[in-house]
């Protein structure tokens, strides 16, 4: 319900891209913090650990990388929309494609992770 209310307020008042750019910068920080937690976990995975644990480490490493990529591309796109950094059309198209690729990879990883949790394998 709160999301719907927020979405309706944005439609009425419009979107303030300057504020979104600040939020996007914070999202990058959050994504990088998650990534450092994942790297700390992965560094603890030793040779004696099971293959399942190593697969989980690789899975979360991929997810955290996609989070960072999506946050960085989102910030670039929001800053372009806000007029903070203007991109030429070719760069804008490249950033959008990179975001889509990161997003699609993220979705595929989460789908694979869901299947593995359901099966109990891998």
Image (tube, rainbow, N blue to C red):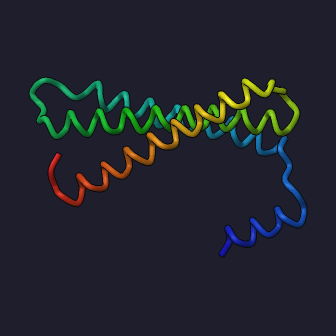
Left or right: where 72 falls relative to 23: left
- Residue located at (88% from left, 57% from top): 14
86 or 62, nearer to the observer: 86
Left or right: where 6 falls relative to 46: right
Quadrant of res 6: bottom right
Percent position (x, y) of residue 47?
12, 24
Percent position (x, y) of residue 95?
66, 30
- Residue located at (89% from left, 66% from top): 12
Percent position (x, y) of residue 59?
32, 38
Percent position (x, y) of residue 101?
52, 36
Left or right: where 114 falls relative to 34: left
Quadrant of res 120: bottom left
Left or right: where 119 falls relative to 107: left
Quadrant containing the C terminus in the rendered view: top left
Residue extending furthest toward the bottom: 1
Above or below, 29 against 107 in this view is above
- Residue located at (72% from left, 24% from top): 91
Quadrant containing the N terminus in the rendered view: bottom right
- Residue located at (80% from left, 33% from top): 80
């Amino acid at each position: 319900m709160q999301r719907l209310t927020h979405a309706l307020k944005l439609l009425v008042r419009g979107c303030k891209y300057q504020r979104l750019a600040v939020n996007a910068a914070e999202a990058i920080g959050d994504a990088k913090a998650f990534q450092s937690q994942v790297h700390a976990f992965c560094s603890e995975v030793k040779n004696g650990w099971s293959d399942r644990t190593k697969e989980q480490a690789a899975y979360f490493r991929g997810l955290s990388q996609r989070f960072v990529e999506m946050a960085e591309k989102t910030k670039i796109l929001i800053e372009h929309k806000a007029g903070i950094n203007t991109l030429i059309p070719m760069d804008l198209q490249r950033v959008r494609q990179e975001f889509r690729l990161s997003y699609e990879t993220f979705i595929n990883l989460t789908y694979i992770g869901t299947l593995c949790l359901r099966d109990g394998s891998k």
